[in-house]
Image (cartoon, coloured by chain):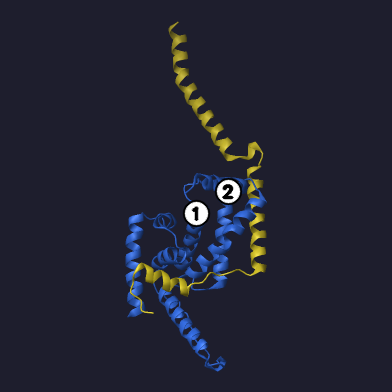
Chain colours: A blue, B yellow
């Protein structure tokens, strides 16, 4: 991490700690979309729950702005707060093993049978299958796969977010990919 | 597309399945307002008068305890000096 980026991050959070509304707005506008996507992808596209966790994440960040020491980037720090909130959601709501996403395509709505539409539908069905498979994995497998392949974060940042060693993350990635492959192709 | 479990394959398949999401403008604005209210609450907490800060009272309590201990250590020597003089 560049030292100037680190200084900027610490500066913004110090200003937030001192009640600077412009700093809050800057932090929010910079990171809200990525954090929302990350959360939404982890909670099975449940928008209402994703918005609730998003609010909890940013409120927790604003309240603990003074505790940020600049050891990681602000984005990584926000991801770690969000990932903990998501893990809490699954732990205490107990929805993970019972939740099934129902996908269906209403054939009455399909008026056009051109090749483009068929290709789009096949592609969407594939994507739905991929999402359904990912959501059937344990939460820590899901988180590590999303952080690595959708958010494209390096292992070092994922290890900070998930509070595990880089070696542990490498092992987790291997196991997650194996289980994902087994479920997707099995 | 056949899934082979490689890094590149996994990235491609997940990137296609998970597109970036956007918040509604209404919710976005409302959340920002909530955050600014929260940040203002932080400011009020840090502006408490000096005597309302718990850290100060802890420091005062430590000083008082050390003073009492110090007095307790000094007192017997003082009494002994007077008895023997």
Which residue sits at x=55%, y=94%?
A108
Residue to which mark 1 is pinned = A77
| Residue B7: quarter of image | bottom left
| Residue B1: quarter of image | bottom left
Res B56 label: none
Which of B82 and A143 lies nearest the eye of the viewer? A143
| Residue A139: quarter of image | bottom left
Have a look at marks 1 and 2 and say if they share a chain.
yes
Residue A167 image offset from top left, x and y in percent = 33, 56
Which residue sits at x=54%, y=33%?
B59
3D distance between C-alphas at marks 1 and 2: 11 Å
Which residue sits at x=46%, y=74%?
B16
Secondary structure, mark 1, is helix
Using residue B54 as the reference point, say whether residue A118 is left or right of it. Answer: left
Residue to which mark 2 is pinned = A13
Q: Earlier in the sequence, mark 1 or mark 2?
A: 2
- The crowd level at tag 1 (other Cα within 10 Å; few <14, some 14-19, many 20+) is some
Which of B34 and A122 lies nearest the eye of the viewer? A122
Residue A27 to residue A127: above or below: above
- The crowd level at tag 2 (other Cα within 10 Å; few <14, some 14-19, many 20+) is many
Seen from this angle, which residue lies furthest front? A115
Residue A24 to residue A86: above or below: above
Residue B40 image offset from top left, x and y in percent = 67, 51
Pointer 1 chain: A
Seen from this angle, which residue lies furthest top? B85
Q: Quarter of the image for the C terminus of chain B: give it.
A: top left
Residues at marks 1 and 2 touching, judged by CB atoms closer than 8 Å: no
Residue A97 image offset from top left, x and y in percent = 41, 74
Pointer 2 chain: A
Which residue sits at x=47%, y=60%?
A84
Residue B33 image offset from top left, x and y in percent = 67, 59
Secondary structure, mark 2, is helix
């Amino acid at each position: 991490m560049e030292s100037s980026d680190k200084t900027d991050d610490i500066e913004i959070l110090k200003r937030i700690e001192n009640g600077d509304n412009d700093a809050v707005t800057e932090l929010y506008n910079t990171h809200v979309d990525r954090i929302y996507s990350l959360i939404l992808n982890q909670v099975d596209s449940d928008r209402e729950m994703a918005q609730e966790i998003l609010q909890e994440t940013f409120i927790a960040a604003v309240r603990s702005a003074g505790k940020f020491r600049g050891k990681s980037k602000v984005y990584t720090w926000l991801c770690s707060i969000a990932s903990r909130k998501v893990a809490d959601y699954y732990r205490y709501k107990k929805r993970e093993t019972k939740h099934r996403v129902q996908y269906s395509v209403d054939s009455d709505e399909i008026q056009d049978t051109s090749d483009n539409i068929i290709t789009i539908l096949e592609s969407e069905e594939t994507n739905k299958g991929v999402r359904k498979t990912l959501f059937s994995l344990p939460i820590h497998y899901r988180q590590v796969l999303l952080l690595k392949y959708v958010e494209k974060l390096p292992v070092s940042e994922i290890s900070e977010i998930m509070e595990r060693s880089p070696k542990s993350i490498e092992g987790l990635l291997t196991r997650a990919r194996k289980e994902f492959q087994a479920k997707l192709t099995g | 597309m056949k899934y082979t479990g490689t890094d590149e394959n996994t990235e491609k398949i997940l990137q296609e399945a998970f597109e970036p999401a956007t918040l509604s403008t209404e919710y976005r604005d409302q959340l920002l307002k909530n955050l600014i209210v929260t940040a203002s609450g932080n400011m009020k907490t840090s502006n408490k008068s000096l005597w309302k800060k718990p850290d100060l009272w802890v420091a005062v309590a430590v000083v008082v305890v050390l003073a009492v201990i110090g007095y307790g250590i000094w007192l017997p020597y003082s009494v002994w000096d007077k008895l023997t003089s």
